[in-house]
Amino acid sequence: MKGTCLCAEVEFEISDKLPNLYQCHCSLCQKTTGSSSCSSFITSVEGFKWISGKDKISSYTKDNGFKSDFCSICGSPVPNRMNIGDYMWVPAGLLEADTDRTIAAHIHLDSRASWEKNANDTKNYPAGPESFEDFVSLLQDVQT
C-alpha cells in the first residue's frame, strides 16, 4: 500500500500486511497533529520503502527522545524509524487507499485533551455541513 504527505512530495510504500491502528492521546501527539490524538500504526523497517521525497523530510527531536518527522513543503507528519527495534511509525491518514484495519488501542488516555468528546455526543455531519453560516452559528452557541 502506498502513502503520501498532503502535497505528495513525500511518498512511501508498505509491503507488509497492514497491522491494526492505535490512537495516542498524549500531549506531544496533540501538539504534533494539532488535534486530540494521532492515529497511526507500526510496521517493520523491512516492509517499508521510501519512493520519493526523503530529501524533503525535516525532523525535530525533543530532549526526551520524542521525534517528529514532517514534510518541509506541506508540514504533514511523515513516517519515521522508531528508536526501539526495527520498526517504522506511520501516520494512518497518509495512506492512499482504504483499509479494513481498525483502531485496536487508545494510549495515554490520562493525557487526553479536556475538550475531547465522544462523537455520539455531538452534532454530526456525514458529508460536512450544508450551510457554512449555520455551522459557524453552532460553533458560536456557547453556554456560559
Image (cartoon, grey):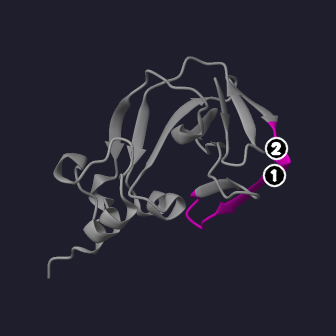
In this view of the protein, which residue sits in the foreground, 100 or 113?
Answer: 100
- Residue 103, located in which quarter of the rendered image? top left
Query: Percent position (x, y) of residue 5?
Result: 67, 45
Pointer 1: residues within 10 angstroms few (<14), some, or many (20+)? few
Is residue 54 shown in magenta?
yes
Please state if 101 lies on the left or on the right of 91 as rendered: left
Q: Which mark is residue 56?
A: 1
Which residue is drawn at the image coordinates 27% and 48% (left, top)? 124
Residue 17 within the magenta-colored segment of the rendering: no
Q: How many marks?
A: 2
The span shown in magenta is 52-66
Q: Nearer the viewer, residue 141 or 59?
A: 141
In the displayed structure image, the side of residue 61 where residue 24 appears, left or right? left
Q: Nearer the viewer, residue 135 or 143?
A: 135
Secondary structure under the numbered disc 2 in the rendered image: loop
User: Which image quadrant: the N terminus?
Assistant: top right
Residue type, numbered disc 2 = Gly
What's the residue type where badge 1 is placed? Answer: Lys
Q: Residue at x 43, y 24 (%)?
A: 101
Q: Report the side of 124 relative to 44 (left or right).
A: left
Spatial CA distance of label 1 from label 2 is 5 Å
Evaluate if marks 1 and 2 touch, with contact meaning CB atoms under 8 Å apart: yes
Residue at 53%, 22% in the rendered image: 18
Corner quadrant of residue 138: bottom left
**Disc sitting over residue 19 in the figure:** none
Image vertical order of residue 110 relative to residue 38, above or below: below
Residue 55 coordinates in the image, percent (x, y): 85, 49
The x, y position of residue 102, in whole percent, is 38, 28
Query: In the rendered image, which residue does mark 2 sit on?
Result: 53
